[in-house]
Image (cartoon, rainbow, N blue to C red):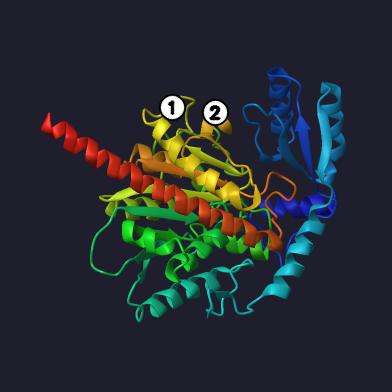
Amino acid sequence: MTNSMISVVLLLCGYVRTEPARFDNHKVLQITPHSSEELEQVLAIHDLYDLDMWRHPRMGNHSLDVYVEPEKLKSVLTALKNLGSHVKIWIDDLQKLIDQEKSSMKRSIRFPYTSQGRSQGFNHFTYHRYSTINQYLRDIETATASMPSVNASVFTMGYTYEGREVNVLKVTRGDGESRPSIFIDGGIHAREWIAPATVLYFINQMVYWDDYAPQLLNKFDWYFAPLLNPDGYEYSHTTYRLWRKNRADHSRNCYGTDLNRNFGFRWNPSVGGSTNECSDVYSGSQAFSEKESQSLRTFILSNKQNMIAYLTYHSYGQMWLYPWGYTSAFPQDWRELEAAAKAGTSALAQLYGSNYIVGSSTNVLYSAAGGSDDWAKGSAGVKYSYTIELRDTGKHGFVLPVDEIEPNCRESWRGLAEFALSLNTNMRRKKIGDRYKSRL
């Protein structure tokens, strides 16, 4: 085993090092099997070599993106060649992308960001660390105290395994009226840095009154939790850029649980998860075994009375997914879920032409039990529940360049706004229909 491979193994097992892991000549392959049978054989190779699948095969497009360390590359390529699968190197040197990301972050750190003539001194178009994100939420709370048209309050939902706060910001019209609410979170997977950045941008647009904000605040109360997995997120910044899970210590030289396999509606490690504590998709010892998933459960259940929508932001793949993830069956109201999602994706595409696929998680992507969106709908009763996979479609994968943050955030904000306004229209129609039925 080479020094590079030993380094990666030690990091995955949780050992601490002083310098971040390097990914020189680590590659991402795009593999396109020619049949369903061949796809199954490719997935068997994935399991045999314990590879990290970045993008899963989906209906109508059986290509998949697989991250491969240099030590495994020759064996994996030989196995794929023997199958006859079409393979191309999608990302040739992952470290080059990471170095570019670091360089662009250094250049963009902390210059004043101006929105509609208001300078907040916070740059939304870079990737921020946990402490900066928390301070931003507190600063927004302080700023809105003197604003007549909007109010924001920070709540600590709970604490992580390593003792960090998991915070949520409630944003309302500030007039004392209770409205239907929408809950939005990001950062449940540590390496998906674009998700917290997107949620932070939503907060800015809502508080500092983008064109959509007055309508959205007049119709809904909003909850924003930018970073559900701060332990893993910090670890991905300091030590291992591709870290996915939280940082719970399983006392067997393996760390972390995949929080998006840990929620309690139809929890089942055999469906897209794992009972192996070292696996990237380890589902936990039981449903809600993790402090972070417990915190989200408690907060949503305490505030679910008027909650109409739950959106959890991830990357990557450009998809707007609704339940179920644990089965290929559709929820009874799937047509309503799909229509609302398409209102968002249609609006989103108008800015830069970004194409987002809409559908149920299992039928568009893959089966995975224990997701937060399944739980929000199936257990908490939140009707419009979604997982949204942000940019891109694989060119950069999880290492989305800083210069793509702005277009991603702008189109995502437009998509969110039109999605929410479509819900308001549906709510009005339902009230009219209910009144009509009551007269019959």
The answer to whether mark 1 and mark 2 are in CB contact below 8 A is yes
Q: Residue at x 74, y 52 (%)?
A: 8
Mark 2 secondary-structure assignment: helix
Q: Residue at x 58, y 59 (%)?
A: 409
Percent across and percent down for residue 37 are: 70, 17
Q: Residue at x 46, y 35 (%)?
A: 338
Percent across and percent down for residue 353 are: 65, 47
First in sequence, mark 1 or 2: give its number.
1
Would residue 135 be seen by someone viewing this image from the given angle? yes
> 99 above or below 83?
below
Would residue 380 be seen by someone viewing this image from the given angle? no
Is 1 on the left-hand or right-hand side of 179? right
Percent across and percent down for residue 16 are: 67, 62
Of 342 and 326, which appears nearest the observer? 342
Query: How far separated are the C-alphas under marks 1 and 2?
Result: 9 Å
- What residue type is disc 1 on? Phe
Disc 2 target residue: 363
Disc 1 target residue: 330
Of 411 and 440, which appears nearest the observer? 440
Percent across and percent down for residue 296 are: 39, 53
Q: Which mark is residue 15?
A: none
Of 23 and 217, which appears nearest the observer? 217
Mark 1 secondary-structure assignment: loop
Of 395 and 17, which appears nearest the observer? 395
